[in-house]
Image: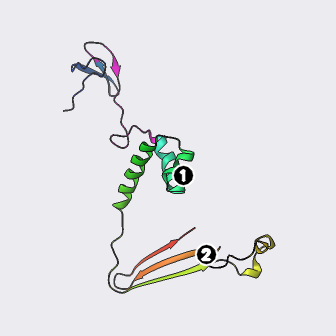
Amino acid sequence: MPQHNCPACNHRASWMIRRNARKCKRCRKERTPRHWLVHGMHVSQQDWRIFLKCFLLYKTICGIRMHFPRAHTLLIKMSYAVRSVMSHDLPIMFSGTTEVDETYISGTWYNKRWSVRKRGTKRGRGTTKQPIFGIFERDRKMVLSMAFV
């Protein structure tokens, strides 16, 4: 059974009054225990939603901090919590015969808009086309495909 010590006077005796609110017997102060999504982090559900949107867009603490201004250590803890949950959902490693392929999707050069062609080509490493990457394992018939933006 959890202990319900009063945060004001640290007295143990209290009683329930309404919807999980408790009242201290000694100082008569009411308190409602907070329920946080992640234990140890005092972050509301709305803040978690904003953080997750920024996390998916920017993926770095500095990028997240531009649109979600919180303490740097809190952002590190939140991103660690998200990454640890994401690590539990990893697919099984590939084994046996595995095929890997990539392709680039985009229109041909002469079908591009004039404003795009005027900027010139991107010579050397890199391209302006959309890369698509795929892995296929023959034994389990498992397909993994990714599109990088």
Residue 63 bears which disc, if any?
A: 1
Whether residue 20 is situated above or below residue 112 in the rendered picture: above
Main secondary structure of the magenta stretch: loop
Numbered-mark total:
2
Q: Is 103 situated left or right of 138 in this image? A: right
Labels 2 and 1: the sequence-earlier one: 1
Q: Residue 67, image x and y in percent?
A: 57, 46
* Figure check: 126 above or below 89: below
Residue 26 within the magenta-colored segment of the rendering: yes
* Amino acid type at mark 1: Gly
Q: Which residue lies under the disc numbered 2?
A: 126
Which stretch appears magenta? 24-45
Q: Is residue 60 above or below residue 36?
A: below
Task: Check disc 2: other Cα within 10 Å, few if <14, some if 14-19, many if 20+.
Answer: few
Based on the picture, tell me whether residue 79 belongs to the magenta stretch: no
Q: Which residue occupies the foreground of this view, 128 or 33?
A: 128
Q: Are circles 2 and 1 on residues that touch, CB within 8 Å? A: no
